[in-house]
């Protein structure tokens, strides 16, 4: 694989050596001598690796580096937002080479995070558990519904500022991602009550189908534990209350502020059960007028 890029001098030579000896994806059956020589590179602190990559790397270099070892691959997935991926084609290729991404941070990567890239992620990265798409405002329901069907292990998804998505995305996530714990919909102003009722209905459906969700939910190990619907101004209190009632880990009270509805002045009547059942707040009685909005 060609590792061309704006590198120069010693770093360039070292990287070329590294790629010559370990450019393929398998990472197995390495020559013992070169393996020892590379160990220093592999042991680079991840922050330093990302710092170097953010300064010198172009799309191709990021892709090549992702093939070096599992540690680098995970670091690039976590820190790709700090890199200047130029286009979605690079991200599509990256996911085709790194199919075991569990965490991917694309917050603000507007040019890389397209619907096409999300479809590639869905196709390639079935183990993905955490994805940040904050402010990737070109993505639509097409990309998110692909994710929902291709990434059933998703635990955390941040779609804040993805202004084009609609209820269709949330309905698909509610149906396709039973382990979803954290969902960020800040400023997704096309979201309506239909999305909220879909989340609530799926919670109830899983409970009723005897999949053990009652037991799971009682331990707060599954189901939504964080939902940000700030600035989703089309939502009404009954729909949001239904979500709050369906997921015991969602709270509006200040101590456990996990259902975030700030900016939605119409939702001030929504509250968690703490005011009515103080034991849920660990024995601390919380008055409803103390809820944070
Ligand atoms: Zn509460």
Image (cartoon, rainbow, N blue to C red):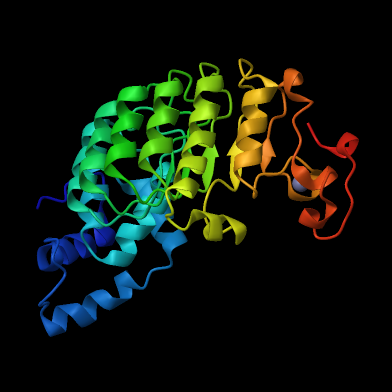
Q: Nearer the viewer, residue 48 or 160?
A: 160
Query: How far from the left and from the top, in percent, is residue 276?
Result: 83, 44
* Residue 21 to residue 202: above or below: below
* Residue 156 to residue 199: above or below: below
Residue for point 30% across, 58% down: 73
How many numbered circles are shown?
Answer: 0
Left or right: 184 in relation to 21: right
Left or right: 75 in relation to 91: right
Specify the quadrant of the image occupied by residue 136. Answer: top left
Residue 58 seen in the current view? no
Query: How far from the left and from the top, in percent, is residue 99?
Result: 22, 53
Residue for point 66% across, 19% down: 236
Query: How far from the left and from the top, in percent, is residue 146?
Result: 28, 33
In which quadrant is the C terminus drawn? top right
* Residue 257 to residue 15: above or below: above
Residue for point 74% across, 30% down: 270
Q: Nearer the viewer, residue 186 or 83?
A: 186
Query: How far from the left and from the top, in percent, is residue 139?
Result: 37, 24
Residue 269 seen in the current view? yes
């Amino acid at each position: 694989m060609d590792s061309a890029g704006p590198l120069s001098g010693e770093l360039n030579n070292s990287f070329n050596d590294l790629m010559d000896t370990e450019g393929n994806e398998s990472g197995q059956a390495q020559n013992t001598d070169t393996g020892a020589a590379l160990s220093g590179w592999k042991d680079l602190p991840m922050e330093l690796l990302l710092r170097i990559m953010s300064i010198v790397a172009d799309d191709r270099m990021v892709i090549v580096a992702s093939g070096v070892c599992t540690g680098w691959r995970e670091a690039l997935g976590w820190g790709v937002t700090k890199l200047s991926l130029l286009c979605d084609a690079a991200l599509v290729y990256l996911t085709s080479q790194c199919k075991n991404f569990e965490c991917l941070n694309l917050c603000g990567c507007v040019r890389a995070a397209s619907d096409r890239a999300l479809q590639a992620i869905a196709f390639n990265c079935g183990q993905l558990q955490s994805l940040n798409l904050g402010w990737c405002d070109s993505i639509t329901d097409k990309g998110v519904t692909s994710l929902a069907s291709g990434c059933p292990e998703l635990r955390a998804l941040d779609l804040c500022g993805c202004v084009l998505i609609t209820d269709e995305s949330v309905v698909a996530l509610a149906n396709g991602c039973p382990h979803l714990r954290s969902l960020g919909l800040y400023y997704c102003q096309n979201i309506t009550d239909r999305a909220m009722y879909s989340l609530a209905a799926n919670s109830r459906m899983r409970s009723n189908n005897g999949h053990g969700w009652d037991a799971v939910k009682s331990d707060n190990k599954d189901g939504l534990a964080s939902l940000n619907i700030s600035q989703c101004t089309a939502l009404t209190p009954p729909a949001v209350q239904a979500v709050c009632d369906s997921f015991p880990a969602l709270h509006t009270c200040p101590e456990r502020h996990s259902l975030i509805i700030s900016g939605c002045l119409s939702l001030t009547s929504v509250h968690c059960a703490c005011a009515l059942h103080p034991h849920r707040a660990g024995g601390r009685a919380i008055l409803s007028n103390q809820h944070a909005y």
